[in-house]
């Protein structure tokens, strides 16, 4: 006779989803420094009572911030505001290494970066050496092709976020009045992706052309070893066609 189980398991909103292996590693590392939350509740919990204090620029001794006397917000120019919003939009893409190729976030993030690069006057090309793991190559041609070129590399993938350890949604960037921006990848290393683009973009806008050609690569999978990201790029004939140093 077929055995049936009279008790059914219905998912409830207050049941915490199973942690991924990477999330468990993050929790383990955080616990060594006393940063892991004391208790776990729903991943949508915004109660910060069980979380470590969030680091802030306000706590940095000797740091002087230019704040508006009326609003108390960090003073920025219209151009800086535009660049900040570009950065925050980029942070919102959930390019977690394990999920990005499957949920389309890798492709959407690279498409966004390409549009930014084109708006800055850079030449662009997207390569998919591994399915669903695009690599963006941008370039600004130098005046002397005999010289070795410069390669600025950065990765757009991020590690998983343990929601219980965040005061806010890690993929909804939050900007504080003092200019602090919180979001997964804000430091490692989506900031560098945008910095590389904006820095070379300023060079283009100045009308000055360097002697050496400048290449920018934006690769996936760095957080899981980079084998199918920068590793594939370097092994491909495409990389060998660039005289990078």
Image (tube, grey):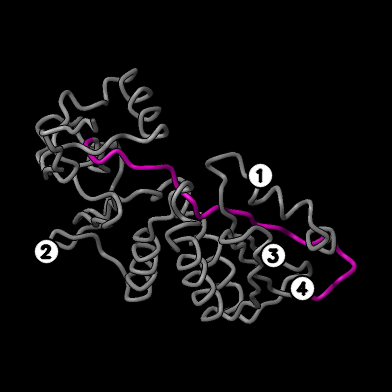
Question: Which residue is found at the position 28% from the left and 47% from the top?
Answer: 64
Which of the 4 quarters of the picture holds residue 196? Answer: bottom right
Q: Find the magenta span and give its range.
A: 142-164
Q: Position of residue 90 (x, y in %)?
A: 40, 63
Q: Label 3 near label 4: C-beta < 8 Å?
A: no
Spatial distance from mark 4 to mark 2, Cα to Cα?
44 Å
Q: Which residue in the structure is indicated by mark 3?
A: 215
Q: Which residue in the structure is indicated by mark 1?
A: 227
Q: Image check: 49 left or right of 158?
A: left
Question: Which residue is found at the position 37% from the left and 58% from the top?
Answer: 91
Which of the 4 quarters of the picture holds residue 147? Answer: bottom right
Secondary structure of the residue carrying numbered label 1: loop
Secondary structure of the residue carrying numbered label 4: loop
Q: Which residue lies furthest to the top in this view?
A: 32
For marks 3 and 2, the one nearer the N-term is 2
Q: Which of 167 and 161 is in front in this view?
A: 161
For marks 1 and 4, the one nearer the N-term is 4
Q: Label 2 near label 3: C-beta < 8 Å?
A: no
Spatial distance from mark 1 to mark 4, Cα to Cα?
30 Å
Q: Image check: 98 left or right of 30?
A: right
Q: Nearer the viewer, residue 182 or 147?
A: 182
């Amino acid at each position: 006779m077929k055995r049936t189980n009279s008790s059914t398991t219905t998912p409830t909103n207050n049941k915490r989803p199973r942690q991924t292996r990477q999330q468990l590693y993050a929790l383990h590392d955080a616990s060594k420094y006393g940063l892991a939350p004391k208790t776990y509740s729903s991943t949508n919990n915004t109660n910060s009572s069980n979380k470590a204090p969030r680091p802030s620029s306000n706590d940095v001794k000797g740091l002087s911030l230019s704040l508006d006397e009326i609003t108390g917000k960090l003073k920025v120019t219209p151009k800086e505001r535009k660049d900040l919003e570009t950065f925050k939009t980029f942070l919102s893409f959930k390019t977690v290494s394990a999920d990005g190729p499957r949920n389309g976030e890798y492709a959407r993030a690279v498409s966004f970066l390409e549009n930014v690069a084109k708006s800055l006057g850079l030449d662009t090309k997207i390569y998919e050496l591994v399915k669903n793991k695009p690599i963006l190559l941008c370039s600004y041609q130098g005046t002397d092709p005999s010289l070795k070129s410069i390669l600025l590399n950065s990765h757009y993938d991020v590690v998983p976020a343990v929601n219980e350890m965040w005061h806010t949604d890690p993929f909804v960037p939050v900007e504080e009045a003092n200019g602090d921006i919180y979001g997964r990848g804000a430091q490692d290393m989506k900031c560098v992706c945008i910095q590389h683009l904006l820095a070379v973009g300023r060079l283009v806008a100045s009308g000055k052309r360097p002697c050496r050609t400048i290449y920018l690569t934006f690769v996936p999978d760095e957080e899981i070893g980079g084998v199918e990201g920068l590793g594939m790029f370097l092994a491909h004939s495409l990389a060998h066609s660039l005289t990078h140093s």
